[in-house]
Image (cartoon, grey):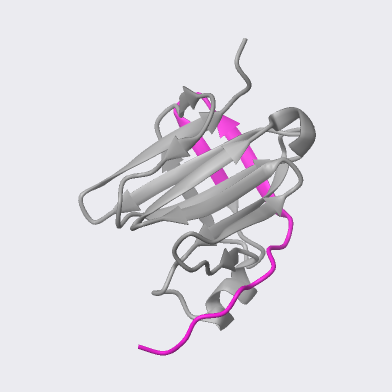
């Protein structure tokens, strides 16, 4: 398998629907994340071995940036043509993806912490594999 690199994300169109989230790639195609995201506060620990994607919207919730975490399947040129970013992290490595959004690798799991007020938008985390998908919205505690 060839090496994968970090890829900076572009701004993408976002539509928050009643039954999911639509992201429009820069090449015009769309991805649909099915279901209402489960609200989580504090650190979100994803299931080990899942493909993890983080979407941070702008304050209007009509645009955002989407970044894959440790995705080894998608070629750099595909990410660049769609506007999706990627960050590759080693075990126990941590990185601030965006202001207010930190991601780290703990074993085979990804941990995400976010402060939506600092991020100035909503923060969604999607985890998926061939068996299914789950979505979360990271919120501050009330």
Quarter assignment of residue 124: top right
- When the figure is inspected, residue 33 is found, relative to residue 35, above or below; the finding is below
Name the residue rendered at 49%, 25% in the picture.
40
Q: Is 117 or 124 nearer to us in this picture?
A: 117
Instruction: Please say whether residue 3 is one of the residues in the magenta stretch.
Output: yes
Q: Which residue lies most toward the bottom here?
A: 2
Q: Which residue lies most toward the left here?
A: 131
Q: Point out residue 105 in the picture as x, y percentages from the top left corner.
A: 46, 56
Name the residue rendered at 53%, 43% in the picture.
112
Q: Point out residue 6 in the picture as x, y percentages from the top left corner.
A: 61, 74
Name the residue rendered at 52%, 53% in the picture.
104
The C terminus: image quadrant = top right
- When the figure is inspected, residue 4 is found, relative to residue 104, above or below; the finding is below
Residue stretch in magenta: 1-22
Name the residue rendered at 47%, 86% in the picture.
3
**Numbered-mark total:** 0
Instruction: Please say whether residue 105 is one of the residues in the magenta stretch.
Output: no
Residue 16 as seen in the image, left or right of residue 62: left
Residue 107 as seen in the image, left or right of residue 87: left
The N terminus: image quadrant = bottom left
Residue 10 as seen in the image, left or right of residue 111: right
Q: Point out residue 95 in the picture as x, y percentages from the top left corner.
A: 63, 57
Quarter assignment of residue 38: top left
Quarter assignment of residue 35: top left
- When the figure is inspected, residue 60 is found, relative to residue 96, above or below; the finding is above
Q: Is 111 or 54 nearer to us in this picture?
A: 111
Q: Point out residue 78 in the picture as x, y percentages from the top left corner.
A: 54, 77
Residue 107 as seen in the image, left or right of residue 52: left
Q: Which residue lies most toward the front here?
A: 92
- When the figure is inspected, residue 73 is found, relative to residue 111, above or below; the finding is below
């Amino acid at each position: 398998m060839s090496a994968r690199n970090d890829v900076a994300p572009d701004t993408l169109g976002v539509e928050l629907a009643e039954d999911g989230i639509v992201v429009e790639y820069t090449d015009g195609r769309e991805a649909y994340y099915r279901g209402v995201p489960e609200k989580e506060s504090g650190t979100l620990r994803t299931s080990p071995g899942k493909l993890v994607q983080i979407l941070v919207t702008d304050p209007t919730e009509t645009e955002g940036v989407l970044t894959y975490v440790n995705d080894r399947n998608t070629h750099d040129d595909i990410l660049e043509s769609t506007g999706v970013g990627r960050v590759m992290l080693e075990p126990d490595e941590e990185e601030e993806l965006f202001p207010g959004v930190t991601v780290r690798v703990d074993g085979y799991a990804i941990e995400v912490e976010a402060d939506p007020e600092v991020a100035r938008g909503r923060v969604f985390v999607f985890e998926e594999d061939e068996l299914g998908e789950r979505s979360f919205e990271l919120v501050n505690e009330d």
